[in-house]
């Protein structure tokens, strides 16, 4: 399926009049079906980690869109610079890491709300929303799961959840919100980590998993033989694993096709096993 790319500059509320966030949208192109509607996909810094919407982000978003999804990619450092990607170099890495802990957590949350609002307003989106992201984006996708409109979320090597160090003051409330029940009754969650990821060591992964399972959150947990940023196909410092990425892309799409790719109607809890089970 062919895709196209556009963007929207959306006014924000937290930063005063005249300020906006640029949200890139990559969507399927169906000239013969001008009224076609597709599920929405909030791609929170997909692949780019702390570098905004880079080449790897756009390529991965294009792959998702070509499967029949409208993909929104917010430029989340709009408080500090324009929407251009941050370079994959020492200066760019330092700048991205600096912005990451200067931005307020509530501002990250506003970006997510604005992106979902945009998706649900588009004529080619059916309003069924999923979220995904990597590294910083994985953490932001995790927080997107708190939104009732998000029906499923896949987080790749999400950083700073275990240490609660996202945002200004390096003191986020992500796991505290889980403990408070903010994921109760929400959508399906998938957490993917590399066992050799030094950004999220074993004790951190164990903490996240225990917190989710103790709260009975519907989560699938995958730990693979990989390092951090193994999905990024550019400047990954020798960590890119294309074969593993392809496999996990298929896993992710199965989750999204099952949860947002079709409308099954309202979920009904079954209190008893069927009478006839083969």
Image (cartoon, rainbow, N blue to C red):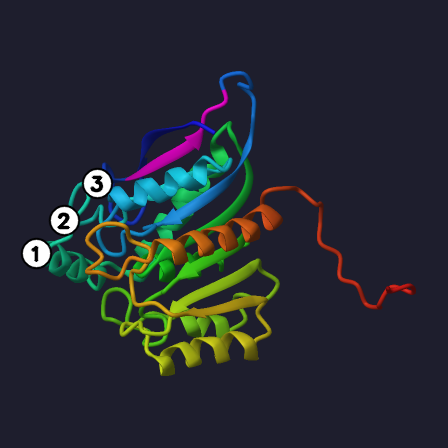
Vertical side of 201 occupied by 140: above or below: above
Residue found at the very far bottom of the displayed protein: 203
The residue wearing badge 2 is: 87
Please provide the residue range marked out in magenta. Answer: 22-30
As measured in the structure, the alpha-carbon distance from the residue carrying label 3 to the one carrying label 1 is 17 Å
Residue found at the very far right of the displayed protein: 275
The residue wearing badge 1 is: 91
Q: Find residue 199 and report its image quarter.
A: bottom left
Q: Position of residue 130 (x, y in %)?
A: 50, 49
- Is 150 contained in the magenta span? no
**Mark 1 falls on what kind of element?**
helix
Which residue is at a point 56% across and 80% down the rendered structure image? 214
For the question of whether residue 117 can be seen, the reply is yes
Q: Quadrant of the C terminus?
A: bottom right
Residue found at the very far top of the displayed protein: 32
Closest to the observer, 135 or 243: 243
Q: Position of residue 237 (x, y in %)?
A: 19, 60
Callout 2: few (<14), some (14-19), or many (20+) C-alpha neighbours within 10 Å?
Answer: some
Residue found at the very far left of the displayed protein: 91
Q: Is residue 16 left or right of residue 26?
A: left
Q: Are dots 3 and 2 in contact, CB under 8 Å?
A: no
Q: Are dots 2 and 1 in contact, CB under 8 Å?
A: yes
Which residue is at a point 50% across and 22% down the rendered structure image? 30
The residue wearing badge 3 is: 83
Tell which tag, 3 or 1, sits nearer the viewer: 1
Tell which tag, 3 or 2, sits nearer the viewer: 2
For the question of whether residue 150 can be seen, the reply is no
């Amino acid at each position: 399926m062919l895709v196209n790319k556009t963007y929207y500059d959306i006014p924000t509320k937290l930063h005063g009049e005249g300020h906006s966030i640029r949200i890139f949208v990559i969507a399927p192109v169906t000239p013969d079906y001008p009224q076609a509607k597709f599920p929405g996909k909030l791609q929170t810094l997909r692949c780019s980690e702390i570098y905004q919407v880079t080449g790897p982000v756009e390529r991965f978003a294009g792959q998702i869109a070509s499967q029949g999804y409208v993909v929104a990619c917010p430029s989340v450092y709009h408080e500090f610079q324009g929407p251009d990607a941050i370079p994959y170099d020492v200066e760019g890495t330092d700048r991205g890491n600096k912005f990451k802990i200067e931005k307020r957590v509530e501002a990250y949350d506003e970006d997510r709300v604005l992106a979902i609002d945009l998706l649900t307003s588009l004529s080619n989106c059916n309003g069924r929303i999923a979220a995904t992201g990597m590294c910083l984006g994985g953490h932001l996708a995790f927080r997107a799961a708190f939104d009732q409109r998000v029906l499923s979320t896949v987080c790749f090597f999400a950083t700073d959840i275990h240490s609660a160090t996202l945002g200004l003051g390096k003191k986020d409330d992500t796991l505290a919100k889980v403990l408070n029940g903010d994921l109760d009754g929400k959508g399906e969650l998938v957490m993917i980590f590399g066992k050799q990821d030094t950004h999220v060591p074993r004790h951190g992964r164990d903490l996240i998993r225990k917190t989710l399972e103790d709260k009975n959150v519907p989560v699938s947990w995958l730990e693979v033989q990989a390092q951090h940023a193994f999905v990024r196909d550019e400047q990954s410092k020798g960590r890119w694993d294309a074969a593993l990425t392809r496999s996990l892309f298929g896993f992710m799409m199965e989750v999204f096709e099952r949860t947002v790719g079709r409308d099954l109607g309202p979920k009904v809890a079954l209190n008893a096993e069927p009478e006839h089970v083969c």
